[in-house]
Image: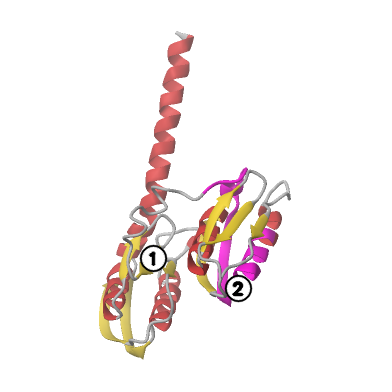
Amino acid sequence: MKTLLVASLVLAFSGILTAQQAAEASSIQQKAEKIILPTVKFQNATIEQALEYIRVKSRELDTITQPPAAKGVSIVLRGGAMTDTISLDLKDVPVIDIVRYCAERVGLQHRVEKHAVVLAASFEEKPEPPAATPPPVLGSADQIVLPTVQFRDATIAAAAEYFKVKSRELDPAKQGVNIVVKPGGSDAKVSLDLRNIPLPYALSYAADLSGHQLSTDGQSYLLTPLKAE
């Protein structure tokens, strides 16, 4: 009887975890579909300007999420600046559709990942989103959740230093994580605006935007240039 009770509890707990994971994976999708922007008017806006407007308005109009730090939809733009501009005049449109329209105007694709909507020229080289292939976890790094991540044209070294400092501040044990940027990379800059995101995912996006591979040797997170300069 005792064995059956333990087994039942294990199964119940597993069910709770599965439901929680499913909820996390769909939360960005749900918010992007349910947050409606009453008015969107772009006249020759850059993709960066358009996405910043969508981010800000999604946070203002998010009535779904309770914690203020988690409000809105995080959007990540992969690749360099686009030369094409965007002109739109819309009313009462969900965030996900506005993102799609903007992406189409500048020849980009979009997809919803676990913690952000991502725009890129192509997803063929990365067919599976982070929800299916999560970034490596060092120790309890996945328990360190950053309320806000905001970079504008930061170097990967500056971004890594920020993550290292914040990981120590937000780690209950005040240990944080070690982060090592290996030499030889390009001078690509990192621009991110994310909310309520676990450290490994924030690091993964920063690595992706700066042309680095994120890995761990068991002691530190390693950011290795994909192409040495």
Dot 1 corresponds to which residue?
118
Residue 42 at x, y percent in the picture: 33, 87
Residue at the image position 38 percent from the left and 82 percent from the top? 82
Label 1 sits on what residue type? Val
Magenta residue span? 136-164
Q: Residues within 10 Å of mark 1 (few under 14, many from 20)?
A: many
Residue furthest to the bottom in view is: 43
User: In the rendered image of this protein, does residue 122 appear above or below residue 143?
Assistant: below
Label 2 sits on what residue type? Thr
The numbered dot on residue 155 is 2
Q: Left of 48 or right of it: where is 195?
A: right
Sequence order check, earlier mark of 2 and 1: 1
Residue furthest to the front in view is: 229
Residue at the image position 31 percent from the left and 60 percent from the top? 124
Question: Quarter of the image containing the C terminus?
Answer: bottom right
Residue furthest to the top in view is: 1
* Foreground tag (2 vs 1): 2
Q: Are marks 2 and 1 in contact (CB under 8 Å)?
A: no
Residue 65 at x, y percent in the picture: 44, 59
Question: Quarter of the image containing the N terminus?
Answer: top left
Q: Residues within 10 Å of mark 2 (few under 14, many from 20)?
A: some
Kindly state the secondary structure of the residue where label 2 is placed: loop
Task: Choose between 90 and 181: the one closer to the eye.
Answer: 181
Kindly state the secondary structure of the residue where label 1 is placed: strand
Per the image, is 196 magenta? no
Task: Choose between 86 and 216: the one closer to the eye.
Answer: 216
Residue 198 at x, y percent in the picture: 54, 54
Residue 220 at x, y percent in the picture: 66, 50
Residue at the image position 55 percent from the left and 59 percent from the top? 203
Picture quarter containing residue 107?
bottom left
